[in-house]
Image: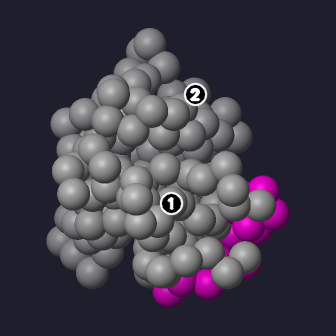
Amino acid sequence: MSAAASVATISRDVPESASGIIALDAIESPIVKQGLAYWTRLKGDRDWPTRADMSPKEMAPLLRNIVLLRRAENGDYEFRIVGDAHVISHGFSMQGLKVSGIDNISPGYGAVLKSLYDHAVHRQAPFAFRGWMERGEKVKQYIYSESVFMPLGPDAHTIDHVLNFSVYIPRDRFDG
C-alpha cells in the first residue's frame, strides 16, 4: 500500500457522536493525562507555557506521542516535532510539512487538523478530543484516538506553538 493510500482520514460513515471534544477530566489515557499534567506544571500561574520551557529530557516517556507545531503568521502550522506513534497511525511522517500541504496527501484531512489546532489557539486553553479515524482504500481499518491540544507562547498575548499528545488504538472495524 502506498503512503497516500494509507493516510488516516475521518470517515463520513462514522456517527458524529463517536468523535468530539471531551472535558479534560474525562481523559482516559494515562499518556494524554501525563501530557496535560506536564503542560499544566510548566505554565504555573501563566495562561500557557513557552516553547522554551519544554525539555525533551523531561518529556522522554511521552515523546513518541507528541506533536509540536509552530504557528505561522498566515494562520498555517508547521509540524516541528512528530512522535512515532503519530507516524505509525497516519502512515507517514508530517515532520517539516505544513498543515496546508496535508491535503495534497490526504484530501480534506489538513482542514480537519487545522480546525483542531485553531481551536486551541482561539480558546487560548487546552482541550481534549476523542474520536475515530479511517485508514485504507480497499480494506478499511479504524483507529481510535484520544488527544489533548495545548497552546504555547512567549507572553500572555501571543500563541506561537500548539503542543499535542495523542494515543492511537487500531481496530479492524468500527463498532460504534
Distance CA(mark 2)–CA(mark 1) = 37 Å
Residue 72: image location, x then y, percent: 38, 21
The three-letter code of the residue at mark 1 reads: Glu
Which structural element holds mark 2?
Answer: loop
The image quarter in which residue 148 lies: bottom right
Is 102 situated above or below 5? above
Say which quadrant the C terminus sits in.
bottom right
Q: Is residue 156 visible?
A: no
In this rendered view, identify the residue nearer to me: 95 or 110.
110
Please, which residue is most extreme toward the right here? 17
Q: How many marks?
A: 2
Residue 61: image location, x then y, percent: 27, 81
For the record, the magenta segment spans 16-30
The image quarter in which residue 157 lies: top right
Q: Residue at x 27, y 66 (%)?
A: 88
Task: Give the labeled residue for mark 2.
Answer: 157
Residue 120 drawn in magenta:
no
How packed mark 1 is, by other alpha carbons closer than 10 Å (few <14, some 14-19, many 20 or more), is: many
Q: In front: mark 2 or mark 1?
A: 1
In this rendered view, identify the residue nearer to me: 85 or 31.
85
Is 109 situated above or below 133? above
Q: Is residue 86 visible?
A: yes
Residue 138: image location, x then y, percent: 40, 59
Question: Which of the marked residues, 2 or 1, is nearer the chain's N terminus?
Answer: 1
Q: Residue at x 39, y 38 (%)?
A: 106
Which structural element holds mark 1?
Answer: strand
The three-letter code of the residue at mark 2 reads: His
How packed mark 2 is, by other alpha carbons closer than 10 Å (few <14, some 14-19, many 20 or more), is: few
Q: Is residue 140 left or right of residue 120?
A: left
Residue 19 drawn in magenta:
yes
Q: Which mark is residue 134?
A: 1
